[in-house]
Image (tube, rainbow, N blue to C red):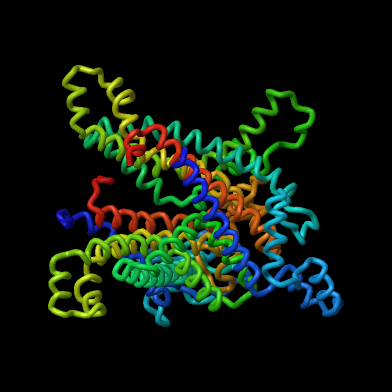
Amino acid sequence: MMRDLRRFWPPLVLLAAFHAAVVLAGFLAPYDYAEQHRDFPYAPPSRIHLVHLRPYAESPDGKSYPIEFLVHGRLFGVRPPGVVFLLGTDGSGRDVFSRLLYGGRVSLLTGLAAALLSLVLGTALGTIAGFFGGWPDQLLMRGGELMMALPWFYLLLAVRAFLPLHISAVEAFALLIAIIGGIGWVRPARLVRGVVLAGRENGFVQAARGFGAGSPYLIRRHVLPLTFPVVLTQATVLIPQYILAEVTLSFLGLGVGEPVPSWGNMLAEARQYHTIVEHTWLLAPAIAIVPLLLGFLLLADALSGQQVST
Amino acid sequence: MRYAARRLLHSLVLLIGVSLLSFLFANLAPGDYFSAMQTDPRISAETIAGLRARAGLDQPLPVRYAGWAESMLRGDFGYSLAYNSPVAPLVWERIRATLLLTGTATFVAWLLAIPLGIWSAAHYGGWRDHALNAALSLLLAVPDLVLAIVLLAGAVETGWLPVGGITSPGWDIMDAAARLRDILSHLALPAGVLVLGMLPVLTRHVRAGMLEALRSPFALNARAQGIPRRRLLFHHLLPAAANPLVSLFGFSLGTLLSASLLVEVVTGWPGLGPLFLDAIMGRDFALVLAVVMLSTALLAAGNLAADLLLYRLDPRIRVQ
C-alpha cells in the first residue's frame, strides 16, 4: 500500500505549511484580527517597492514607509502612521491578510476537532457493534441508515436550525464542532464495523480468545489496530469536508460570528456581489481554501494508493 | 414484484423513522417561532401563551405529531407560522425552480461525464488520461461555494450573464423564443456551477467502471474477435460497467432537491434553498421540517428507483 512514498510528500508539505501559518498567526500577521483602521475601509493591497534593497510599503494615502522586521513580536510591520495591508482591508478597515491567518485557525481547528469527534464516536460504536453483534449492532445499523437517508448538508442545517441562533463566538465554535462531528459518525462507524466483523474471525484473535483473553483486551490489543488504515483514510476524507462545512455555515451566518474571523464569515461580505467586484481581494479566503482542500485530496489519493492523479 | 414491495416497504419505514426523529428534535429544541417576541416588552407573556395555544404548541407531543403527520399526508405539509398559511403552496413554486435548475445541471453533467469517463479510460495511462485527471482533481478541490462566488463576480464584471432571479423584468411582454432565451441565460450561471461541481465525481466513477470492464476477459476476447473500438466501448463495455453508475444515477436523482441549496443562495436563484435558509433564520419549524421531509423522500425514492432499475437491468441481482 505504501509503495510510492514520494506521493505523500507534496500534500504533506502543503498541509504542514497551512497549519504552521495558522498556528503562527500571532507572529506572521502584522495586525490583530479585530484591529480596525477606520480611515482605510476597502483599501486595496499595499504596494511594496524596494529602495536600496529595503522594502517600503505604500499606504493608501500615497506615502511610503519602511517595512520593519521582527518588531513587537511580529514578523513584519510598519511604524504608525504607516500601514501595510498585504491583501487589502475589508469594510471596517481590518487587514484581510491578518484575518485570513486568524480565520484559518477557526476553520482548520473546526475541521480537525469535528473529524476527531466523528472518528472517535464512529470507531467506538463501530467496534462495539462489529465485535459483539446482537442488538447493539442492529440498533447501530438501523439508526445509521436513518441518518444516511437524510441529505447530509440539510441535516446539518436542520440541526443548526433547531438550536439557538444568537450565541457567542466560543459557544458557536463548540456548537459547530459538536454538530458537524456528531452528525458524521455514521460512515466511519459502518466502515469500522465491517473491518471488525472480518477481523475478529482472524486466527490470532481466535487463538488469543482460546488462551482466555477477555473482550476488552482482545479489542484493544488485536482488533482496534486492524481498523487503523480505515480510520486514517476516513480522516483525510472527513477533515476537508468538515472544514468546508464550517466555512459554509459561517458564510450563511449560522456559524462563528463577528468579530472573530473564520474563512466563512469573511466570505459573507461577498454575498453582496457588487462588493466583491470592486474589492476582489476580499475573495482571499475562497482562494486559500482551494490548495488546502487539494492537499487533503492528494493525501487521500496517496493513502488509498489509487492512480487517480499524476 | 416481491422484491419491489419489500424495498418500497423499507423506504416507507425509513421515511416514518426520519419524520419521527426530526419532529422530535424540532420540538425538543429550545425556542420556537414566538421566542423572538419574548424580548419585546410590548407583548405580554399571556399574549404569547395565547398565540402558542392557538398554534397548538401547548399540546402534548404525540398529539402534535399526529396533527402534523395528518397535515403531511393531506398534502398541506404543515402550517407555517411565519407565512400564516399551509406550507405546500409556499414550497410548490420553489420546487419547480429548484427542479428546473438541478434537473438541467444533472442532465448536462451526466451527458459530459459519460463520454469523458469513457474517453479517459480508453486512453488509460496516457497523457490525455493524466491531463484530464489532473484537471478533475483540481476541480474537485474547488468547492461549489467558491465556484459560485467567483463565477458570480465574473458575470457581474463582464455583464455577460444576468445575475439573480429566474426571469428578467419585462417577462410578460416577451414572446416564447425570448422567454426561453431569458430563462436559459439566467440558468447558465447556477447550472454551470452545479455541473462543474458534479463533473469530477461522475467522471471518476464512469472511468473506474470502464477500466474494470476493459480489464475483464470478455473485453479481451471481444477485441480479439475484431470488434471495432467504438462499438466495443459503447456497446459491450458500457453496459457491463453500468451497475455502479445506475446506483449513482439514482442517487443524483435523489439529490435533485437538496444539491443546489448553497448555489441557489449565492446566485439568488428563487428555489427551495433561500426559502429554507429564511425558515431557519425565522425559526419557522414547519417549513424546515417540510423541506427536510421532501428532500429525504426524494432521496429515498431515488435510491429505490436505482435498485429497481438495477433489478431489471442485471439478471445477476435477480438470482440472489
Residue at coordinates 62% horizontally, 33% vertically from top-left? B185
Residue at coordinates 16% horizontally, 80% vertically from top-left? A212
Which corner quadrant of the image does residue B315 belong to?
A: top left
Choose between B11 and A307: the one closer to the eye.
B11
Which corner quadrant of the image does residue A159 belong to?
A: bottom right
The C terminus of chain A, quarter of image: top left
Residue at coordinates 25% horizontally, 74% vertically from top-left? A219
Q: Is residue B256 left or right of residue B278?
A: left
* Residue B20 x, y percent position in the rendering: 59, 63
> Can the viewer see residue A22 in this picture?
no
Residue at coordinates 70% horizontally, 62% vertically from top-left? B284
Choose between B304 and B30: the one closer to the eye.
B304
Choose between A86 and B171: the one closer to the eye.
B171
* Residue A64 x, y percent position in the rendering: 49, 66
* Residue B319 x, y percent position in the rendering: 33, 38
Q: Is residue A195 left or right of residue A174?
A: left
